[in-house]
Image (cartoon, helix red, strand yellow):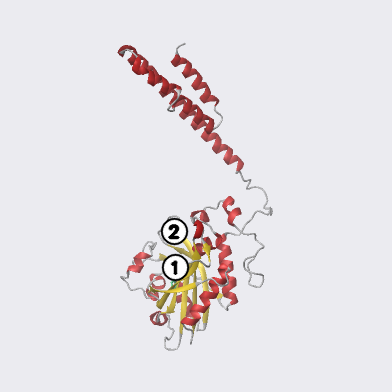
Amino acid sequence: MDAIDKIRERTLAAIVAAADPGQLDAVRVAAIGKKGDVTGLMKTLGSLEPDARRAFGQAVNQLKDDVQSALDARRAVLDSAALDARLMAERIDVTKPARFQGQGRIHPISRTIDELTAIFTEMGFTVAEGPDIETDFYNFKALNFPDDHPARQEHDTFYLPPDAEGSSKVLRTHTSPVQIRTMEKVTPPIRIIVPGRTFRSDHDATHSPMFHQVEGLVIDKKTHMGHLKGCLIDFCRAFFDVDDLPVRFRPSYFPFTEPSAEVDIGCSRDGGGLKIGGGDDWLEILGSGMVHPRVLEYCGVDPNEYQGFAFGMGIERITMLKYGIPDLRPFYDSDLRWLRHYGFLPLQVPTIAEGLNG
Ligand code: DAH
């Protein structure tokens, strides 16, 4: 038997015997890697006479092809065995009766909503809700977005197919429409928060087409910017559990508030890690402002009698910051392993009285 046949026999046997991808790769390297047996045969070609070289070259190429096909075939078998093993290991018998196994966890988004609610209800807010599918009026127009305003495009709105009159509903791009719905039906004083789902056509490590916001609205006769600042500073310090957390108000623009401010909290990024509080860096966490008189008018609230403030923030973002969760996408994967790691025990309900943070 010549060298080619010996290598073929030995390599094909080793491929069939490889029990996992690691072993298979070792066989591949030993055969067709840089210093492999087959590669070694190739290197001897140069020293042969032209005729012999052609025949030998063809035989070595054939060997190489045979080895490659055997590797591919074995890889497919191992991959499919690995998938079968994983499916068996993760098998859930859905016919079994539900029994508490101490494994259920509260999702971090639900947890943050519970925490926000505990903080704001303690301050006298109640929780309001509104529909996920909105009209242009509630999502934009009554919030003082002019028809051709660029902010409409910035919201990356999902439009539903137009109705018989040709008007399209939208998946709400923020929770602010619930401000309008509330002011239309409730006579001030108003003090609400609105946690809920929101939708924008945007998808990467920090954006999901479905996400959550919480809106806040306070309307009364003398509510002013000082109240806005006090309320949001108290909230940030309670939520992040840092008593002296620096909070900064930066002038900004939203169509529905005037003046408007974005709120940053102090943080440090020393040593690569992010630490909330202290430091000389800032993180933007929410938008706010005094409700625009035109918005009050749209809702039938007299701006000469009433005024107030509003705010809105992304729930995923503050959850990721508080709990050091680096990627947004697993929030919606329903992967129990992730949930066991980042989730919360069901009976640890956050309350102000018992301490929000356990
Ligand atoms: N609706 C804004 C957004 O989605 C957030 C926001 C900013 C809400 C300022 C407010 C506010 O109520 O006053 O980007």
Among numbered discs 1 and 2, the one appearing first in the sequence: 1
Q: Which residue has dot 2 on it?
A: 209
The residue positioned 58% from the left and 37% from the top of the image is: 85
The x and y percentages for residue 97 are 68, 51
The residue positioned 56% from the left and 29% from the top of the image is: 19
Q: In the rendered view, tell whether residue 289 sits above or below residue 150.
A: below
Regarding mark 1 in the picture, which secondary structure is present there?
A: loop
The residue furthest bottom is 305
Label 1 and label 2: CA atoms lie apart by: 12 Å
Amino acid on which the number 2 mark rests in the picture:
Pro
Between 260 and 249, the residue placed more toward the observer is: 249
Amino acid on which the number 1 mark rests in the picture:
His
Mark 1 and ligand 1: say if the CB distance to the nearest ligand atom is below 8 Å.
Answer: yes
Q: Is residue 104 left or right of residue 71?
A: right
Q: Is residue 81 visible?
A: yes
Which numbered circle lies on residue 174? 1
The x and y percentages for residue 126 are 56, 76
Q: Are marks 1 and 2 in contact (CB under 8 Å)?
A: no
Q: Is residue 35 left or right of residue 162?
A: right
The residue furthest top is 1
Quick check: which quadrant has ligand 1?
bottom left
